[in-house]
Amino acid sequence: MTSTPASSETVTSLLRGLDVLGILSRADHPVSLAEVARLADTTRATARRLLLTLEKLGYVATDGPTYWLRPKVMELGDLYLAGLGLPEVAHPHLAALAARVHDTCSLTVLDGDSVVYVDRVKASRMMTVNIAVGTRLPAFAMSSGRVLLADLGEQDLQRFLDGLHGEPITGHTRTSPAEVARLVARARADGYAITDQELDPALRSLAAPVRGPDGHTVAAVNVAVHVTRTSVQQLRDDVLPELLVTTRAIEADLAAAPQLSAG
């Protein structure tokens, strides 16, 4: 990984500090100073100053040799969600959907080539994938990603496809740009998308878009089910109608408070 390019209009130290936060957030273990410097493409001295600054601010903890994120970093995500407003509007509808279908339901948005979970209501049934608010997953392999990508303009979608070099997550993951383009086009035509064991061999998922008052997609609602309990046909016949009731209810609330959908 290289550091974020700077320009005359940017503050280099801030960019580097955010790079370091990103490095620590992607690590599944405490990270050494040398590793931070290498991944941030900077010197050990600069990396040390950045880490010490982030530690003083309360975002990073250290035992001396290694560094990791502290819970305070979640405040940054909370500020984003508060500004977005959408999760607060959607949550009661998401909870009602989870209660009706007895499966975990999520609200997601598109950020670059990733889907970001901004709200999630867990069902009583156990799931094999541990996903929390703030989790990022590759859009190309997600039902929610495909309905979000379906709203992109032609040039933006082509840029996404041109940059797609996805690795298969399971033996069922569709990775070729041509196939992903076909699946996105199908999601656009159908108004929903289904993925079957592409993220996890034990899961199927169904997603539909949430549109703002201007007709553009602002989020997607996703229902995840276990393959042993729910077939693809059952997703279409039983879960899809409930999902569409939910997305329409969220859209109605957004229409009553349109400033939230513009967040």
Image (spheres, rainbow, N blue to C red):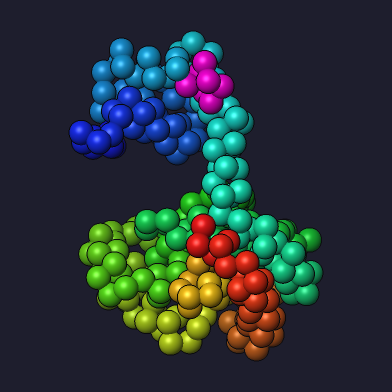
Residue 118 percent location from the top left of the image: 58, 55
Compared to 233, does 207 lie above or below? above
The residue located at (48%, 52%) in the rendering is 136
Q: How many marks?
A: 0
Residue 221 percent location from the top left of the image: 59, 69
The residue located at (50%, 83%) in the rendering is 191
Compared to 64, does 221 lie above or below? below
Residue 98 percent location from the top left of the image: 74, 68
**Left or right side of 76 for 34:** left
Compared to 111, does 104 lie above or below? below
Q: Nearer the viewer, residue 210 or 125?
A: 210
The residue located at (40%, 33%) in the rendering is 18
Residue lying farthest to the left in this orientation:
8
**Left or right side of 26 for 228:** right
The residue located at (26%, 18%) in the rendering is 43
Which region is colored magenta? 54-60
Image quadrant of residue 234? bottom right
Let me know if residue 255 is in the magenta part.
Answer: no
Using the rendered image of the protein, determine whether residue 200 is visible from the camera's viewpoint: no
Using the rendered image of the protein, determine whether residue 5 is visible from the camera's viewpoint: yes
Image quadrant of residue 157? bottom left
Residue 36 percent location from the top left of the image: 36, 25
Quadrant location of the N terminus in the rendered image: top left
Q: Nearer the viewer, residue 182 or 125?
A: 182
